[in-house]
Image: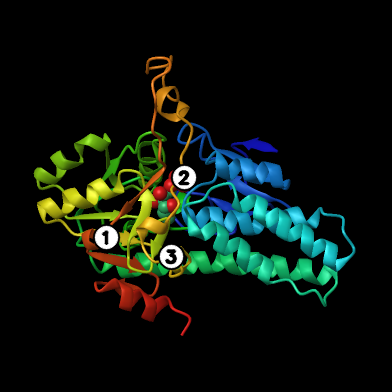
Amino acid sequence: MSMENKNCSHEHQGVRGLPDTVAFSPDGRALRILDQTKLPGETVYLDLTEPGEIYEAIKSLRVRGAPAIGVAAAIGLYCAALRFGETDTDRFIAKLRETADYLNSSRPTAVNLSWALNTMTEAVDPALSVEDNLARLRAKAEELRDADIAACRAIGEYGLTLLCDGAGILTHCNAGHLATTRYGTALAPIHVGRERGMNFRVFCDETRPLLQGARLSAYELCANGVNTTVICDNMASQVMKNGWIDAVIVGADRIAANGDTANKIGTSGLAILAKHYGIPFYVAAPYSTIDLSTKCGDDIVIEQRSPDEVSELWYEKRMTPEGVSVYNPAFDVTPAEHITAFITDRGIVRPPYTEKLARLFGEV
Ligand code: MRU
């Protein structure tokens, strides 16, 4: 179901001028997302209940950003389960696992998706009735949503300690409010700083091919009154050379145990540039993005997307010759050695990463 520019009942407005990215619908029976493929031109909300439509929304980036897809999948799984029509607990749980596996296959790189779905399926108990298990699933989805908001808020607070009023910041893709339940990761320090009357000059890489920087980061930063400049991806070196950048802050889709970090394609190049110019390169991410079971970046599966995103999308007519090969990886891996520090919800983490990440985010 699609609604254009309707008044939605959002309980809180975390960032000035921005509605929640993922939420329960007002009747609590559907996943409500802000359709990010329509931004910045149109504000369209979708209420989703069917596994197929939730899968499609994640795959086609209607809802996107690692933490947001985790929370969307959790709420979506619960809403789908409400409609299973099962009274037998064993069959209900089997269907729940099957649906979780299906949703998990929508995108491979962001660990938050599998992490949230596993957390949901682990919440059910075969000894309980379907009704009681549904109540548990609802509570777990709410817990994941609230934990994401709290984690992003904490990232904002910690990140702000690294920034001065008026700082020039370069960011890539959208790791903001729109990519999480609220506040964002890379953009959270900026939003929290705005609440305290600070301003920054933020440069958003446009982020080819899907333009998350030009369309989404620019939209949410402008909505919050931030001094925002969009640049093409190939201009980053120039703005750094001009002395306009005090810090690069990006998000993450999966952080391996040694600190190697998968994030939007183009991130690793920025890290190399930042090192060249002596600019700190920060990765902001919550606990749900840290995957200690993945040893290093080589073990991270990188999503490959349709060639059409490069050769046709955004153009009036096809702009590459028919038949030419197109390589379209959605993410790349930044080696840990290029990362100055991680800004996490448990504090700022500096090298050596293997020991420190294990200490902060390990089981013990
Ligand atoms: O393909 P996307 O738009 O989902 O990619 C998003 C990113 O790469 C973000 O930087 C990452 O998920 C962190 S979002 C807080």
| Residue 137 % position (x, y) | 71, 66
Mark pair 3, 2: CA separation = 16 Å
Q: Is mark 2 within 8 Å of ligand 1?
A: yes
Check disc 1 and give the amino acid type: Tyr
* Within-10-Å neighbours for mark 1: few <14, some 14–19, many 20+: many
**Callout 2 secondary element:** loop
Q: Which residue is pictured at 40% across the width and 35% down the height? A: 328
Check disc 2 and give the amino acid type: Glu
Mark pair 1, 2: CA separation = 23 Å
Image position of 198 (left or right of 288): left
Choose the circle earlier in sequence order: 3 or 1.
1
| Residue 323 % position (x, y) | 43, 17
* Within-10-Å neighbours for mark 3: few <14, some 14–19, many 20+: some
Residue closer to the observer: 188 or 213: 213
Q: Which residue is mark 3?
A: 294
Residue 287 location, quadrant: bottom left
Residue closer to the observer: 280 or 119: 119
Choose the circle earlier in sequence order: 1 or 2.
1
- Whether 342 is drawn above or below 62: the answer is below
- Residue 251 visible, this orientation: no
Report the mark closest to the observer, 3 or 1: 3
* Marks 1 and 2 in Cβ contact (< 8 Å): no
Check disc 3 and give the amino acid type: Thr
User: What is the number of the mark on residue 282?
Assistant: 1
Q: Which residue is mark 2?
A: 303
